[in-house]
Image (cartoon, rainbow, N blue to C red):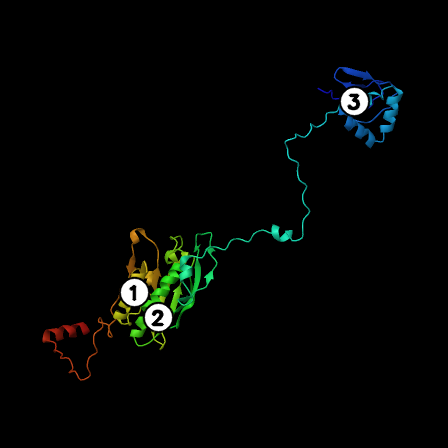
Amino acid sequence: MVPFYRIACVPGIGSSGRALYGGGKATKHLPSSLPELPVCSGMPIPQAYRNLRAHGLLQAWVMALAAGGMLALLPAAMASVPLPRPRPAEVPAVAPEAAPQVGDEKKSAPAEPATPEVSACRKSLTDDIAIAPSIAPIRDASGCGGEDLVRLEAVVLRDGRRVGLKPAATLRCEMARAVADWIREDASPLAQSLGSELDALDNFDSYSCRGRNRVKGAKLSEHGKANALDVRSLDLADGRKLSLTDRALAPEVREKVLWSVCTRFTTVLGPGSDWYHEDHIHLDIAQRRNNYKLCQWNIYEPLPATPPFLPAERPSDAPAPATSEPSKGEAGAAAGKAE
């Protein structure tokens, strides 16, 4: 093992007239003529060399060594400093980095995120079926939102006419397709059977981040998943409005709508289901075990023109009601009370 030489140059060196130089057991004594050098003790020789040079004392130190006959030891001490091992032959040489070329900026630019794959529903919901542009996914911290969303603005009938949704509905693509099929296949023919054309659908609510029936803390509604639509009426081109929960609307018309929506949607809630759906019809396509469907909508009969609990008015030509005269006993009792 190569000895590791150190130079002992403690503060006040020279005051004792001695210093150690060397390594292992081989030591030498420096003469007392060596000047006092303010450097630290126990340094490797190369570090001490730099330290002396930094303090401008290197030349004085070398002259002191020469005067003491110690200059010859310096090369041997420097030669004993450990050197790094040679590079193994099997390690491949590191190629120098190539200088950047013109146009490399474009190559090194980060790749753009891949466009999400278009769903089968989105491919089928073409412009000849509905005006429903895609919108960005909604991801709410509460769990609301969804993927593959559209803004259903109008449904295109087979003859090219459009039935607008007022206002436009934010829905999942599959729900929008179910609404479009219902309007095209069922609602529009119903309007034609009434001697008019379907012009618009009154959208009471679509996407809304809330619990069921707007109850705080309730389970997330299908509206919060963009999977439901609330409908109040079907508006005809001649100005008539088919209010689906109005008892004045013919029961057979409401029954046709009932059967059509209960066939196409998995949830239908209307009058009679609960107090929250007395003025609109709730439609959604929630998935349940064994494809279970929920259809709760009572078709009430129209109210009678005259409330049955009020008596009929007395005809003006009816004879006056007969009155009986009080007996003598009743007359005397009434006179006694009067007194």
Q: Residue at coordinates 61% horizontally, 51% vertically from top-left?
A: 107
Q: Residue at coordinates 81% horizontally, 16% vertically from top-left?
A: 28
Mark closer to the chain start, 1 or 2: 2
- Residue 214 in sight: no
Quarter of the figure with the C terminus? bottom left
Three-letter amino acid code at the position of disc 1: Ser
Q: Which residue is mark 2?
A: 234
Give percent across and percent down for residue 287: 34, 54
Give percent across and percent down for residue 85: 69, 27
Mark closer to the chain start, 2 or 3: 3
Q: Secondary structure at mark 1?
A: helix
Mark 2: few/some/many CA within 10 Å (<14, 14-19, 20+) = many
Q: Secondary structure at mark 3?
A: helix
Q: Secondary structure at mark 2?
A: strand
Give percent across and percent down for residue 233: 35, 69
Q: Which residue is mark 1?
A: 260
Q: Is residue 204 above or below residue 290?
A: below
Camera-nearest residue between 164 and 116: 116
> Which mark is nearer the camera, 2 or 3?
3
Three-letter amino acid code at the position of disc 2: Leu
Tag of residue 77: 3
Three-letter amino acid code at the position of disc 3: Ala
> Which mark is nearer the camera, 1 or 3?
3
